[in-house]
Image (cartoon, rainbow, N blue to C red):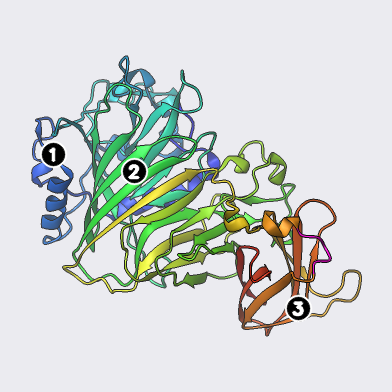
Amino acid sequence: MTPSSPFPSLPSRRRFLIAATASVCVPALLSGTRLMAEETGAHPFSFDLLTEEARARAATPLPEPEAIPQVFADLTYDDYNLIAYRPARARWNAPGITWRMMPFHLGWLFKEPVHVFEVVDGMATGMTFTTDDFEYRHRLQGKVPPGTALPGVAGFKLTHPMNRGDKMDEVISFIGASYFRALGLGNAYGLSARGLAIDSGLPKAEEFPRFSAFWIEKPAPGADTMTVYAALDSASVTGAYRFIVTPGVETVVDVTARLFFRGDVEQLGVAPLTSMFLFADVNRGEFEDYRPRVHDSNGLRILRADGDVIWRALDNPKALSSSYFGEPEMRRFGLHQRGRDFDDYQDAGARYDLRPSVDIEPLGDWGAGKVRLFEIPTTVEVHDNIGAFWIPDTPVKAGDAREFAYRMHWGRLEPDYGDDKAIVWATRGGTGGPAGLENPPDTHKFVVDFKGGMLGRLPADDAEVKPVLTINGGTADVTTLSRLPDGDVWRLVVDVASEPGALVEMTAHVAGYGRKLSEIWSFQWVKP
């Protein structure tokens, strides 16, 4: 997203379309609650008060959505992209304050007002916005009356010096349903997060909860953190959220979600992440493209309680696929972008090499549950097709209350060679059998590179080094492990055979000297 435009750049357009369409389907709330009864008058506010409001709303049905002026509802995509917030009118644009808040305009697909309040010393006052806060360019000039009060906004972004002390950088933005995104030092926007996912990736209509109002604590002069509160609503749930945002090399967002359920929920997705994987080495041959890779993320990384790391390499499958990881007391899970050189992607516009990785670190006891990864087929990069979230084992019933706290880490998140283990560096795929010979029709070759750690320092003829491979749904015809001639990389090559249409689940790691020497590679494949 550019500093001058409230609309995302082309590579992220589809994800905002999804978010916006979802918000159209979920009515705005809170208009009759105590915390919003006097938008322009000051009233007491705290996270506990917001929590009690959410608890009370859960006992009432979802109200009808608020209407917006027709002139805004009729905005097209091209119209919407001609509207820009005036930076000089940013909130807290005053000496000594190092944060700015800039709203996104209503209209096009963002047709439900989001209400924003400023919190000072425990008192909240509604922020008001008018058409004078925005610039209406080209054909929109003169079509929007000046000085007209807006019924709300579509969302907002927060800026703070991060890359240079004299320049305001975008840190986090909230727009569309419960979507938000953040940046670490030197990042460009990529994957997104959501407040909550309900029935995502199931063979039924997904429900999109929506942040319908925000309360933002006015930053003190020189403050390094920002605190944002939000009310979440949908047909099945209400919620009170708190986000504590600390920008840096890794931007940290501490999230507390207090949820109250209006109805039963078949699948609750906690700390959901949304990303895109079009192609890389594993499926490069399916695309005629000059770029070697196109993805916002290329792996799901799970840090287990015992310190082992699972690296589930991402794919762009032929049909919807899901992988589940039952990980009691896991330390982290997240979607990562490995490969930080421009040459890995060769895209000077999208700069996939700058896209952030995100880790979710549970705080407190989440109870029993599992991480779900789902992958959706796509043929173009503007489609988000990757989802990951945590699902509690205990079913969610109407009248239940749940609380989840977690810490989000946004940034480059360079690979961690913890316990001196090699990382999964690359996953490649191709036709099985020896190169240059007639290939057997029922096999597929997988090539996995492990880099660094103790393994990377061992000689090629070390007899202690062995591959450990598990395959469900297929068989391994040929398996070899060897050190590459240059650098600190070992390569595992596996030919896998299976029946057409069979689902094959694979894991592999390198072992030796009585221990694991690498992360655990994981992949799912369906033979065409």
Q: Which residue is mark 2?
A: 110
The region drawn magenta spans: 458-462
In the drawing, what numbered circle is on residue 443?
3
| Separation of residues labelled 1 and 2 (CA atoms) | 27 Å
Question: Does 218 sit above or below residue 281?
Answer: above
| Separation of residues labelled 3 and 2 (CA atoms) | 48 Å
The amino acid type of the residue labelled 1 equals Phe
Q: Badge 3: few (under 14), some or many (20 or more) residues near its Cα, within 10 Å?
A: many
**Magenta stretch: helix, strand or loop mostly:** loop
Mark 3 lies on a secondary structure that is strand
**Mark sitting earlier along the chain (3/2):** 2
Residue occupying the point 32% across, 21% down: 97
Q: Nearer the viewer, residue 96 or 462?
A: 462
Q: Disc 1 vs disc 2: Cβ atoms closer than 8 Å?
A: no
Q: Could you say where residue 233 lies in the image, as x and y percent from the top left?
A: 23, 54
**Mark sitting earlier along the chain (1/2):** 1
Q: Which residue is mark 1?
A: 45
Camera-near label (1 vs 2) is: 1
